[in-house]
């Protein structure tokens, strides 16, 4: 496969108004402008691993500086990262996770859980609960019933339906 | 923002061998070739909603046929969809979720949960447990401790570390 992902973000913004809210009733569609971008996911992953500076992301990802600049700008505009100056002379800024960025961690863990199951050959990074020392096994559940997502029938209700 | 997502999938495949397994120890990185693509996420969403046919996806997404063809081919190669012939004269195929595709639902639900929290203006689709009738509230938890992902300190261990 030698495919090229070549999507205009504006495709998704056709459904959005200027406030970046959306007439699209699907909460997934509202998130894909950055969640559906491979570099953005990896930048968020690295931010959760503690990286904050341009050069750290660049080295970790092997990404072209222009592409990294664009992704960091998008993630900042989208409210997942915020810039903070850490040096005045010379002026230098780092990128810190916002609350919205921190709350993206469950998405990353579920992508990782899928990858562990279906792309799991060879050795993988593992994550442990630092308090108990047990390895983390991430699962998505319905907090109301406790059932794992996907194990019970789901009824979808569009706005206006009952 | 009028940005263009323009990633070569081969960027991610630099770390992959011919069997599409990966020397990259990160299970997220191994999944981004399709999970980091907005159209692929929306196709998977629609497949979970019961769509199976090219024209159904095309109409639902407003996607150009060439792009849809490419995405369906990738998702089939990656093992999330499988083609099945439903008519011999004329020959017609539909796309069904595989086990790997069905197991991607938790990722979609967590993206949706994030979108509901941070892109939630206006009315949204809602999901209910068809048995209990209660609205589903998707959360990612560590199955071992029961703690929500992100609420406790995490220790990351790379291959070869202890």
Image (cartoon, coloured by chain):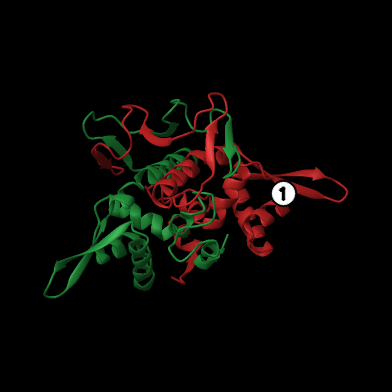
Chain colours: A green, B red
The location of residue A132, given as percent across then percent down, is 23, 28
> Is residue B122 visible from the viewing direction of this image?
yes
From the viewer's perspective, is B112 left or right of A162?
left
The location of residue A144, given as percent across then percent down, is 43, 28
Q: Residue at horizontal 60%, vertical 51%?
A: B43
> Is residue A121 visible from the viewing direction of this image?
no
Question: How dense is the environment of label 1, judged by Cα within 10 Å: few (below 14), some, or many (20 and up)?
Answer: some
The location of residue B96, given as percent across then percent down, is 67, 42
Farthest residue to the bottom: give it.
A90
The location of residue B17, given as percent across then percent down, is 48, 53
The residue that disc 1 covers is: B53
Query: In this orientation, which residue lies closer to the viewer: A90 or B88?
Result: A90
Chain of the residue on which disc 1 is drawn: B
Q: Residue at horizontal 61%, vertical 56%?
A: B71
Q: On screen, A87 above or below B45?
A: below
Q: Residue at horizontal 86%, vertical 51%?
A: B90
Q: Quadrant of the N terminus of chain B?
A: bottom left
Farthest residue to the right: give it.
B89
From the viewer's perspective, is A4 left or right of B68?
left
Q: Quadrant of the C terminus of chain B?
A: top left
């Amino acid at each position: 496969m030698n495919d090229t992902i070549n999507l205009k973000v504006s495709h998704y913004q056709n459904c959005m108004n200027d406030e970046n809210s959306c007439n699209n009733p699907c909460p997934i569609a509202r998130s894909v402008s950055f969640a559906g971008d491979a570099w953005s996911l990896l930048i968020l992953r690295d931010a959760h691993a503690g990286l904050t500076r341009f050069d750290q992301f660049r080295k970790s990802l092997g990404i072209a500086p222009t592409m990294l600049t664009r992704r960091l700008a998008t993630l900042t505009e989208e409210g997942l990262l915020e810039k903070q100056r850490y040096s005045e002379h010379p002026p230098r800024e780092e990128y810190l996770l916002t609350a919205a960025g921190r709350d993206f961690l469950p998405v990353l863990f579920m992508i990782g859980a899928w990858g562990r199951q279906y792309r799991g050959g060879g050795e993988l990074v593992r994550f442990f609960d630092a308090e108990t020392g047990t390895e983390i096994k991430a699962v998505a559940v319905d907090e109301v019933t406790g059932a794992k997502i996907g194990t019970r029938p789901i009824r979808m209700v569009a706005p206006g339906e009952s």
